[in-house]
Amino acid sequence: MTKLKKNLLALAVVLVILGAALGTFLLVKPDDSDTGAPAIPAAGEAQAVREDSHRLSNPQRSEMTLVEFLDFECEACGAVHPTVEKLRQEYGDRVTFVVRYFPLPGHRNSRTAAVAVEAAARQGKFEDMYKKMFATQKEWGELKNSQADVFRGYAEQLGLDMGKFDASVKDPATEERVKADQRDGMGLNVQGTPTFFLDGQKIQTPRTYEAFKALIDERLAQ
């Protein structure tokens, strides 16, 4: 192997490691038809949160809205999930926590997972399936074969009406709901997951719970 090839190989390894450490990044152009990625909305049309966005908390007097664009197969999203849950426990009566789908094409089952969660949401079980996906991520994440049957099994465990669930999974409107979140994310220049917005402003994801808590406390004090 020539010295040049060795250097290129070493560089490739470094880039892979950096990608894993920093999270999952957007690997598709907006017009990539092979992935079914939605087109980017016109300037000014994208919104961080909409009326029909899924809310994990909805306090009567919300002082702040925290929105997360996520991919259920993203390891970085799985890693930050306990932090989000802890923040919800502490600030759920003051902060509106919102989840938006942003499945990336580099993950074989990310879109399938999002569709399954949205199908569960049609029966009022969004949060239950959302939690189930992250609790089991290490079991199905990064697998190359479809995990649709596994996700269907989760729906059964949650006691969903399976006839309705299957119909929702097949309904084009369910995937369109996922794409609607993606469109907003692309329009807001979301380039990887997880990406957070505080009151409509994109923030750099804090590395620890303490740092995230300090940021929220600072904003609430303003």
Image: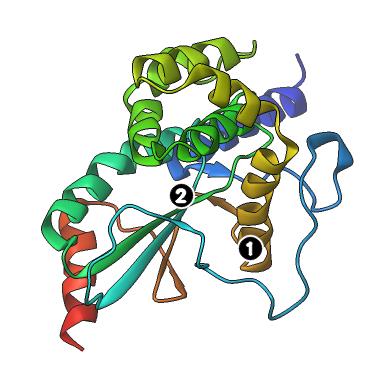
* Residue linked to disc 1: 184
Res 169 quadrant in image: top right
Residue ranking furthest to the bottom: 222
Position of residue 198 relative to residue 209, above or below, is below
Q: Which residue is drawn at 86% across and 51% down?
A: 31
x and y percentages locating residue 18 in the rendered image: 50, 39
Q: Report the residue at 16% width, 73% height from top.
A: 217
Residue type beneath disc 1: Asp
Q: Which mark is residue 194?
A: 2
- Say above or below: 86 vs 221: above
Residue at screen point 56% across, 19% down: 163
**Residue 28, x across and y down, in percent:** 75, 44
Is the C terminus in the top left, top right, bottom left or bottom right quadrant? Answer: bottom left
Amino acid type for the residue under numbered disc 2: Pro
Q: Is residue 210 left or right of residue 144?
A: left
Q: In this view, does 175 lie to the left or right of 68?
A: right
Task: Please tell me which residue is depicted at 58% across the width and 71% down the height of the picture.
Answer: 47
**Could you say which quadrant of the image residue 91 lies in?**
bottom left
Left-right relation of 4 to 15 = right
What whole-number distance in Å separates the C-alpha atoms at marks 2 and 1? 14 Å
Q: Which of 12 and 190 is in front in this view?
A: 190
- Do callouts 2 and 1 mark residues in contact (Cβ within 8 Å)? no
Residue 153 seen in render? yes
Report how many numbered discs are placed on residues in the image.
2
Return the x and y of residue 93 as percentages of the image width and height: 16, 65
Check disc 1: other Cα within 10 Å, few if <14, some if 14-19, many if 20+.
many
Q: Nearer the viewer, residue 12 or 141?
A: 141
- Closest to the camera, between mark 2 and mark 1, is 1
